[in-house]
Amino acid sequence: MKKILLCSANPILIKSLYGVMRDDGYDIDIVEHPALAVQQVLAGGYSMMIVDSEPFGLSAEDAVQIIKLTMPDLPVLYVGSGAHGAEPAVDAPVDLEKFKRTVQAIAV
């Protein structure tokens, strides 16, 4: 079972994505803030991180930059609008079927 970290403070987004990913057999941990996501990822054990690009606290982009410095091979998927460089993104509102296909393609 793949372990994924979901970083979002949006309860509706969390509920939607968590259910879809659990149904597909992923083990999901949730954190609200990007700074906590950095700590969790550095502690290890994740095969992928999904981050809500909505700004709160440390920006999602800054958190991903920090994580990529230490774990450059960790796949990251942004959820929401905005520029994310080379990292894949799914626009909000989230099309759950497209989201599932994107996660499956990245988490292989």
Image: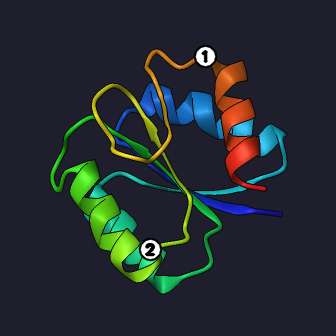
Is 9 on the left or on the right of 41, as rendered? left
Q: Which residue corresponds to the image point at 65% horizontal and 67% vertical from the top-left?
A: 47
Is 3 on the left or on the right of 8, as rendered? right
Q: From this viewpoint, which residue is outermost toward the front?
A: 86
Q: Which residue corresponds to the image point at 44% horizontal and 74% vertical from the top-left?
A: 40
Q: Which residue corresponds to the image point at 51% horizontal and 36% vertical from the top-left?
A: 14
Q: Quadrant of the N terminus?
A: bottom right
Q: Quadrant of the C terminus?
A: bottom right
Is 18 on the left or on the right of 52, as rendered? right
Circle 2 Cα neighbour tier, 10 Å, few/some/many (<14 / 14–19 / ≥20): some
Q: Secondary structure at mark 1?
A: loop
Nearer to us in this view, 98 or 84: 84
Circle number at residue 40: 2
Residue marked by disc 1: 95
Q: Quadrant of residue 74?
A: bottom right
Nearer to us in this view, 3 or 90: 90
Q: Secondary structure at mark 2?
A: helix
Residue 90 vs 58, above or below: the answer is above
The amino acid on which the numbered mark 1 sits, given as a three-letter code, is Asp
Is 32 on the left or on the right of 107, as rendered? left
The amino acid on which the numbered mark 2 sits, given as a three-letter code, is Gln
Q: Which of the two labelled residues, at mark 1 and mark 2, occupies the earlier sequence position?
A: 2
Q: Which residue corresponds to the image point at 37% horizontal and 33% vertical from the top-left?
A: 10
Q: Measured from the top left, where is residue 25 in percent x and y? A: 84, 49
Circle 1 Cα neighbour tier, 10 Å, few/some/many (<14 / 14–19 / ≥20): few
Q: CA distance from mark 1 to mark 2?
A: 27 Å
Mark in front: 1 vs 2: 1
Residue 29 vs 92, above or below: the answer is below
